[in-house]
Amino acid sequence: MPRRPDLIFLTLIIGIALGLRVWAPWGDVFVDSRVNFLETDAWYHIRLLENQVRNFPHHITVDPYASPEAQYVAVAPLLDTMVATVVVATRGTHASTADIERVAALAPPIMGVCAVFAVWALAALAFGRREGLLAAFFVAILPGHFLDRTLVGFVDHHALEAWLMFSVVAAVVAATRPLPMRNALPTGSALPTGSALPTRGALPTRGALPAIAAGVFLGLYLLAWTSGALLVAMIAAWLVTLPFIAKAADLAVAATTTAILAAVALALVLAFQDSHLYRYSMQVVSLAGLLAASIAFLLLTPRLSLMTLRAAIAGAVVVMAIAVPLAAPAFTSQVLFDFMRLTPDPARMSVLEARPLFLYSGNWHWTQPWEFFRSSFYLGIVGVVWLAASIWRTRRVDHWLIVIITTSMFAATVGQNRFGYYLVPACAVVMAWLAVRVLDWGGVPHAGNRTPQVRSVIPLQREVAVILVAGLAVAPNLVPAAITTTRSGGMPVYWAEVMEWLRTETPLPFSSDDYYLARYDPANLQAPAYSVMNWWDQGYWIAQTAHRVPAANPTQAKAGEVARFYVATDEAAGLAAMKALHARYVIADWELPFREMGQGALGGRFENLATWAGRPTADFYQLCYAQAPTGWQSVWLFREAYYQTLAYRLTVLGGAAASPSNNTWVVRTDERVDATGRHFCEVSDRQIYQTADAAKAAAQQKGRGYLAVGLTPWQPAFPTPAITGLRLARDFRQPGQPLTEAPVARVFEVVQ
């Protein structure tokens, strides 16, 4: 049992964790009469919650509001079911949408605090009380994805995942860690002649309860995240590598633990998980495989030497690597696909959280871990390497699990930065272990040893140790953590007005608005009368807030078709794309085209549009450089096709015709190679022309290397005809926006 002072410190730490996650963002989330959630997916969780509360305990499996052709709900049910249960228990099945939103908004910080408690339990069980308190404090205040995703209003399953994952690891550590020696002799006493050393406890003296708890947490984790087989794979990797570091007795304890947890988790998944859910088969197969491997270990460990067992494992891995792809090609393809998601991909670059860590900005930056995680990323590396090295001496199987989890999270986060919400708690654990090693080196007193005796290596060694821990593990992280908590809400005012207009001023897509909260029969769904053409980022806003059907949503379903509409340079082709998606309205917002950001940088989503449409970006624009007195200066060249796209014509021109003058240039471009061998485009000459036709004629006459282009992404450089198949229905402006600027969002309607 924890000591009373430890409980007091833990309570203070939890108070700090909760305060950070609630106090600063409160005013941005709870705005007037609405809840402004901090990220896009939150709105869809509210959509699912509203429906589940009304039809409790049933949840949506196929959603007619998600896309023009309905869509299977590929969301694990646990988060929504937990929140819906709280709402029904406190407000009943007729709770207002506002009540549901408020309860949901508070769920992430509460689950984040639970994750802090799980990290404390893990570090305390694996290392000791000081490490437990330090780990809890670190994870409470560290910046990065964990803090971000546990803020009030960040309604998604990430906070729940982190809580359950580290609860699983803490329970496995409780089941496999060495127990304190019994009947310990007083200090300085000797054993009687011929007596054996007291042995550490094994599973029978520990009981099966920790392993059962691990299985329950693992089952809940899989019910919270469809890709939860990742944790099963890490536990399996831990088990199969144990014969190379552990003793036979510890291996038997670990195998018994994994057998129990796999059996319990498998029972929960089979009983409660939707068998149609994406990656359901991977969850079942991974748990069944872990159970089979655990049983094999239990059967073989007493019969084989460790050397023979190691050879058998190596042989089994080779056989499975050959046999599984032949016997289960579909399963193998799914596994390979999931691993390939951790490699760079142009389509995933359009999703910020799916970008590789070092490519988050779009270009490789070695400093990106510092931008996100500050010192915890680097101290985590030092801590996990040092801990791994110590295992060769201690042979601690529970410590090896922490090394496996932390190393895996480093690899996953480098592949996709989103996994930082797992990495931060893992780093907090190994940082705490590292910090205590430093404090012990300095001879810092603590409750277990108030007068430590250490060999002095340097002057003021104790003070240096404290400064190292405070200066490296705490100080660099406080200001970035505070900045993270000031994150603003996800839906700007003008988008809220767009959603309100769609909901109140456009026809119902179904027979009645009551259909939004109906209990759906997947075999008998109503087809929507129309959809709203939109970029996928706003799809969940349209479904939940406007009660309309988006053409695309954040699952990226139909993203390619929508992108081809926005980059279409022919109105007829765009209208054909709308017809294929049954779209009656089009939303064009100011982020679809490019816009100048200063210092040669561009903002906007146009590159994503071109990528999703499968079009080379060179069809629309090109980045070149020109020599200037201060050095090389970036020059963006916009081709005529860029100004002809529907994204530009609808957003910037409002569908009207354009006849620009004195904004079309003829530039000379030359291919160059810099000192590092990289090829780049140089603009060596440029000249403005009164009309686009004159510029195109001049470029053609000058020949190779000369282009007629625009140099401004917003001001037209080529003539465009008016759009006749769509009419402007409504403009929307951000409060305080000058009337001389183009509206930030426009809604168009198909001309019947």
Image: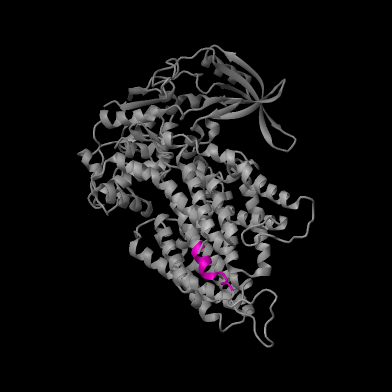
Residue 107 in sight from this viewpoint: yes
Q: Quadrant of residue 671?
A: top right
Q: Which residues are magenta?
A: 170-180
Going by the image, does 392 lie left or right of 578? Answer: right
The question of residue 173 being in magenta is answered with yes
Q: At which x and y percent is residue 692? A: 52, 16
406 or 183: which is nearer to us?
A: 183
The question of residue 101 being in magenta is answered with no
Q: By what rule are the colours in the image chosen?
A: one colour
Q: Residue furthest bottom?
A: 194
Residue shown at 34% from the left, 34% from the top: 34
Q: At which x and y percent is residue 554? A: 41, 42
Q: At which x and y percent is residue 326? A: 49, 67
Q: At which x and y percent is residue 171? A: 49, 65
323 or 729: which is nearer to us?
A: 729
Going by the image, does 286 lie left or right of 751? Answer: right
Residue 426 in sight from this viewpoint: no
The quadrant the C terminus occupies is top left
Q: How many marks?
A: 0
Residue shown at 56% from the left, 69% from the top: 177
Magenta: main secondary structure equals helix
